[in-house]
Image (tube, rainbow, N blue to C red):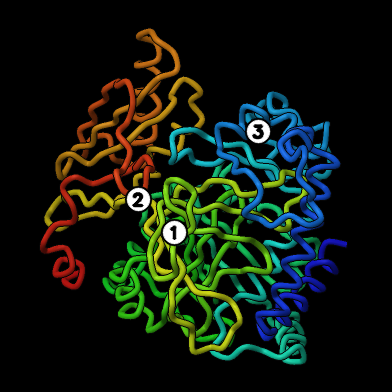
Amino acid sequence: MGLLRVIGLNFSLLAANKATPEKIARIRERRFRRLLRTAVAQSRFYRELYRGIDIETCQLADLPTVDKPTMMANFDDFVTDRRLRRAEITEWLRDKSHLGQMYLGRFIPFQTSGTTGENALVVYDRRALDFVHAALIARHALPEEPSLLGFLRIMFQSMVKKTRIAAVLMTGGPYPAYTAARYPPPLHGLFVKEEVFSLLDPVPTIVEQLNAYHCDTLFSYPSLLDILAREQLAGRLHLKFTAPLSAIASGSEPLTDSTRRLAQAAWGRDVQDTYGSSECFIMARSCGKFERMHVSTDLCCMEIVDRHNRPVPDGQTGDKVLLTNLFNLAQPFIRYEVSDVTGYSTESCSCGQPFPTLLPVEGRTDDIFYIDRPGGGYDAVHPYLFLGPIVELAQVREYQLAQTGRNEVTFAYASADSGPEVDAKVREVLETGMRNAGLLDRMALKTTRVESIPRDPRSGKLRQIISRVGAPPDLDDNVMRH
C-alpha cells in the first residue's frame, strides 16, 4: 500500500500547491487535532504534559514547549507505541546489517548528528516516511506547476523512461538523509532509478561514479555540490541536466550564494534549496522559480521565536524555531525547539503558491577543507571523509574538527568517559578514516580533550566542522586552470 499512499498524497500535496491560504489552514487544523488526539491517547509524556488542556479547542501557542534533552530523557514515554524502547532501538541501530530493514516490521529509526551537543533518536513509521517521499515529488522544482493531468503524464513518462536520481550522502550509518533513501516506497522502481553514492569516498571516485551513472537529478549537501561544481568547471565531471524532470537539489546545510553561482556556471541551472530537520525532513523548499523557500504549512507548523519563546515579527530573524510535525504520529514533535536562525519573509514568490516564504536559514555550514596538491594547486576535502565514524563513538559526547593550517586539522572533543584508552580510540578512528581517504600522509592531525565545545553565539549550535584558514585566495583561478 506504500506506493498507492504516496500517489494519493502526491495528488493531495499538488492540490495544496494551488489552494488558497484558507484551504491550507483547514488542512493544517485537521492534521493538528489528529496529532494532539494521538499524542494524548498514546503517549504517556504528552498525556501528563497536557493535563488540564482542552486539546479540541486549544491554540498551538497555548501548549508548552519541548526540547531535545527532555525528549531524550523521556523517550520511552514520549513515543506513541509502547514497543519503542530507547535502549533496544539504540542497540538495534549498532548492527549495520539492519540498514534498510524495518524495526519491528513497521518503524524506521535513525540518529541525528548532534550539532546542538547531543544526538537525538528519531523514529518514523512507514506512513510518516510516505509523507516525506510524496513531498519530495510534489514539491519538486519544475518550471511550471503541473496540473493533476500533467502529473499523470509525468508518471507515465517516468514508467517509459525512468528518471535517474543520484544522491551523494553520508552513508554507512543511521543518518537521516541516507535513512530516507534506504526506505523508498514499494514499487517506486517502476518510475525511478536511484543510486546512492558515498560521500566517504574520495572526490575522484565520486566523480568517476557520477560520470558513469548519467543522472537526471542530483541531490547532495551544498558543501559537496560546491566541490562537484568545481570538478565540472575543471572538466573532470561531465554531468548534463537536460531531461524535463532534471534538477539539482540540496539539503542538510545552508545553501550559499557562492554555491548557487558555481552551479549556474557549471551546469546552467539553479539549485533547489531544502530546509528540514531530522524531526521533520521537509519544512520548507524552493519552487521552480528559485526565489525563496516556501514553508510547507500543510505538513508542519514553524513558529519563529526569540530565546524567550516570544513570536518574532515577519521580516526579522528569531533565535530558534518551535517545530510541530503534523504527519509523524509515532513520535510527536509538538512545539519542539530547533535552534536554527531564520525568519518569515515579508515577500511572496512570483509562483503564486499559498505558502509563506522564509528568510535565509543561518544554520550550520560544514566548511570544506582545501589542502595543497602535490605538484601545485589544491584538493577539496569534505571533512566527513574521516569524521563520519566519530558519531558512532559512544565515549565522545561532543566534538569539533577544525582546519588549523592549510595541511593541518585539530580534533577537539569532550568525552563521556575518562582514561587514556578513550584518547587512543579517538585517534585510531580518525587515523583510520584519514588513511582510507589517502590523507594520513598529507595532513597533520592534532587531538585535544576539552571540557566542552563553545557554541556559536548567534545560533547556539555547535559547529562540528570549521575551517579557520578558509579557502585559498587563488582557489577559483586554480580550478579554472585545471
Element assignment for label 3: helix
On the image, the x and y values in percent for residue 417 come to 44, 13
Is residue 29 visible in the rendered structure shown here? yes
Residue 440 x %, y %? 27, 34
Q: Amino acid at mark 3?
A: Leu
Using residue 138 as the reference point, say whether residue 421 is left or right of it: left
* Label 2: few (<14), some (14–19) or many (≥20) C-alpha neighbours in 10 Å: many
Label placed on residue 221: 1
Q: Residue 33 versus residue 386: which sits nearer the camera?
A: 33
User: Whole-percent x and y of residue 154?
Assistant: 70, 86
Instruction: Name the residue at 33% across, 43% down.
Output: 465
Q: Amino acid at mark 1?
A: Tyr
Left or right of residue 147, residue 284 in this image:
left
Residue that mark 3 sits on: 93
Q: Position of residue 136 (x, y in %)?
A: 63, 68
| Above/below status of 351 relative to 330 | below
Q: What is the distance, in whole Å, between disc 1 and disc 3 at their CAs?
A: 24 Å
Left or right of 153: which side holds 196?
left
| Image quarter of the C terminus | bottom left
Residues at badges 2 and 3 in contact (C-beta under 8 Å)?
no
Seen as rendered, the residue at the extreme top is: 419
Few, some or many residues within 10 Å of mark 3 (<14, 14–19, 20+): some
Q: Is the residue 109 above or below the residue 278 in the image? A: above
Q: Are circles 2 and 1 on residues that touch, CB within 8 Å?
A: yes
In terms of secondary structure, where does tag 1 sit?
Answer: loop
